[in-house]
Structures are given as C-alpha cells and as structure tokens.
Amino acid sequence: ETGVTQTPRHLVMGMTNKKSLKCEQHLGHNAMYWYKQSAKKPLELMFVYNFKEQTENNSVPSRFSPECPNSSHLFLHLHTLQPEDSALYLCASSQDLTSGMSGELFFGEGSRLTVL
Amino acid sequence: AQSVTQLDSQVPVFEEAPVELRCNYSSSVSVYLFWYVQYPNQGLQLLLKYLSGSTLVKGINGFEAEFNKSQTSFHLRKPSVHISDTAEYFCAVRRQGGKLIFGQGTELSVKP
C-alpha cells in the first residue's frame, strides 16, 4: 500500500456533472497539496492545507472546491468543469510545510480526469 | 518570476549508456533545486535535492546532479542506465521564501 492513496484513478465526467476526488495519506503528515498535471506543461500547485487549514489557493477557479476534514484526508470537489480541465490531478503530503519546502513531498498516483 | 527550463522533452538512450538530463533555471539568489522522477502510472518521487553545501548531489538509483551557479544549471546524470530508469524526470526550483516551480519534464526512454 502506498503512503498516499488517490481515488478514483480515472474519472470521466460531463460539464454539468458534480464529482469529487479523494486523497488519503497514511504517513502521519500534517500538510497536503493538490497539483494539476497537464500534458506537456509544468506541474501547477492548486491548493495547500496545513493542519486542515488552507494556506494557499493558487488562483484556482471556483469550479474546483477543496475540502480537508482532517490531516489525513483531502478532497477536490468538481462542478461545471470545462474540457481544458482534463488532466492528471496529483495529491501530495509532507510532514509539515517546512519539509514540503525542502522538497520532501510524497505523491499519490493521481486521478486522471477527462471532461467531455 | 522564477522559472525552470528542461531543455529536452525526450531523451532516448540505450541500456548501460550514460545519460544527462539538462535543467536550467532563471537566476536568483539562494535557490534550492530538486529532481523528481515519475514512473509510468505513478506519482512523483523525490530523486535528489540541493539545498546548500557540496555542489555535487547524489540521489537514489545511482543518479547525481551538479549545481552550477555560474551557468544556472542543475543537470542530472547517471553513468549507466537501466531499462527500469524509463520514466519522466522533473526538475524543480524554489527560491528562499518562494514556491516550488516545476519544469515541463523530460521523458527518458531506455532501450535494450
């Protein structure tokens, strides 16, 4: 079992659907992150949570809504998405923000999202 | 703003040959540099990092990278690659107090 688990691994949704991506970390970490990985583009940081509190929103459109009920779980709620939102969404965790800034990020395998 | 350029999008190489994956960053004081590897259908994994000290950094799986401040580069090298090294490699940079910025990635394809 990997330290960071993401479900579902694949998701296809229409532009009017509402769905959620789930991330769970079993590492006892306190910081969690959402990244977007589009083909041939650099990874984009979307959100950062530290001890369940959002510390960063990197100008992400409101059709993406994160939720962090506890330090082990992170959700990304999706609604009225656009085809250009199709990408691999990666969750990551770190012991804390300091270790995250030292590059000690542990990534999940990602959720491949296709918006039709 | 800080930026990272990975000069090669794809690098094909034969097994047991040496490889260098190039990374340049925009100049800034006090930068921290990282290489991550992403195997097929997996998330990213930290390969090595430079925070301070020796400019030659050794990482996992026999990889190493050298921080060259004058050339603003942090190229990744391995003297002899294996089939299992086939993956995408990402260079990333962070300046003090700033965000982690990733490059676009280099696909390393090792052929028998």
Image: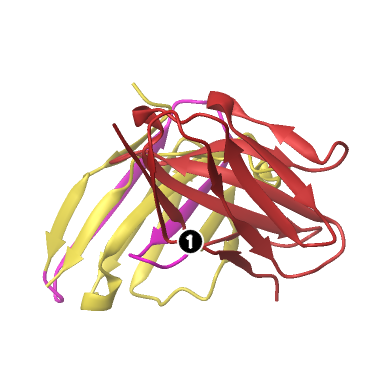
Chain colours: A yellow, B red
| CA neighbours of label 1 inside 10 A, class few (<14), some (14 to 19), many (20+) | some
Q: Quadrant of residue B69?
A: bottom right
Q: Is residue A38 magenta?
A: yes
Position of residue B59 in the picture relative to residue A8 (left or right): right
Please name the residue shown 52% across and 76% down the image: A59
Q: Position of residue A21 (x, y in %)?
A: 29, 51
Which residue is painted at 42% across and 54% down in the image? Answer: A67
Residue tagged by mark 1? Answer: B8
Amino acid identity at mark 1: Asp
Q: Is residue A14 above or below residue B38?
A: below
Q: Is A33 situated above or below B43?
A: below
* Up-down relation of residue A80 to residue B37 (above or below): below
Give the residue at x 70% y 76%: B1
Q: Position of residue A60 (x, y in %)?
A: 46, 73
Q: Is residue A51 visible to us here?
A: no
Nearer the observer, B86 or A36: B86
Of the 4 image quadrants, the one containing the N terminus of chain A is top left
Q: Secondary structure at mark 1?
A: loop
Q: Nearer the viewer, residue A102 or B108?
A: B108
Image quadrant assignment for residue A40: bottom left
Residue found at x 53% / y 25%: B61
Give the magenta range. A14-42
